[in-house]
Amino acid sequence: QVQLVESGGGVVQPGGSLRLSCAASGRTFSSYTMGWFRQTPGKEREFVAAISWSGDRTDYAYSVKGRFTISRDNAKNTVYLQMHSLKPEDTAVYHCAGSQTIMVVTTEYEYDYWGQGTQVTVSS
């Protein structure tokens, strides 16, 4: 069993930056593919980014490519999402998720564990 707790959300102006963190419990964290998803009211959960267990492979949604960076520190059982050049349309609740597959996956049904989420609001 893996428990995930996100932090780092908040209110930021357009063009600003935030770094989200996701702390994981459990000794098997380092073997999981980790991902970030986001959701706004009335919409389906949307893939944002994913990273392989070793950190050498990543994937991003087209809408965030070049602005967001996913990384992980297996010694700290933590995955990060660095967000730059934020836009109002990035406003959402951001969830981290863990998948037992070794592939870098982008669909939510391939993830086994989910955090409660952290709110990111981009507004002037």
Image (spheres, grey):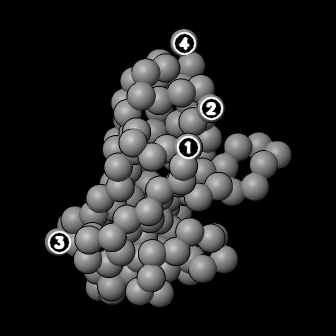
C-alpha distance separating marks 1 and 4:
21 Å
> Looking at the image, is mark 2 or mark 1 nearer the viewer?
1
C-alpha distance separating marks 3 and 4:
37 Å
- Residues marked 2 and 1 touching at CB (< 8 Å): yes
Location of residue 43 in the rendering, given as x and y in whole percent from the top left corner: 78, 49
Residue 34 location, quadrant: bottom left
- Residues marked 1 and 4 touching at CB (< 8 Å): no
Question: The residue under label 2 is which amino acid type?
Answer: Glu
Compared across the picture, whether 32 is left or right of 123 comes to left
Mark 1 or mark 3, earlier in chain: 1
Compared across the picture, whether 43 is left or right of 48 comes to right
Instruction: Name the residue beneath numbered marker 3.
Output: 75
Question: The residue under label 4 is which amino acid type?
Answer: Ser
- Residues marked 4 and 2 touching at CB (< 8 Å): no
Location of residue 115 in the rendering, given as x and y in whole percent from the top left corner: 52, 63
In the image, residue 29 sits, relative to residue 73, either above or below, namely below
Compared across the picture, whether 122 is left or right of 71 comes to right
C-alpha distance separating marks 2 and 1:
10 Å
- Residues marked 3 and 2 touching at CB (< 8 Å): no
Instruction: Name the residue beneath numbered marker 4.
Output: 124
Location of residue 59 in the rendering, given as x and y in whole percent from the top left corner: 44, 62
Using a 10 Å C-alpha cutoff, classify the residue at mark 3 as few (fewer than 14 neighbours), some (14 to 19) or many (20 or more): few
Question: The residue under label 1 is which amino acid type?
Answer: Ser
> Looking at the image, is mark 1 or mark 3 nearer the viewer?
1
In the current view of this chain or complex, which residue is farthest to the left? 75
> Looking at the image, is mark 3 or mark 4 nearer the viewer?
4
C-alpha distance separating marks 4 and 2:
12 Å
Mark 4 or mark 2, earlier in chain: 2
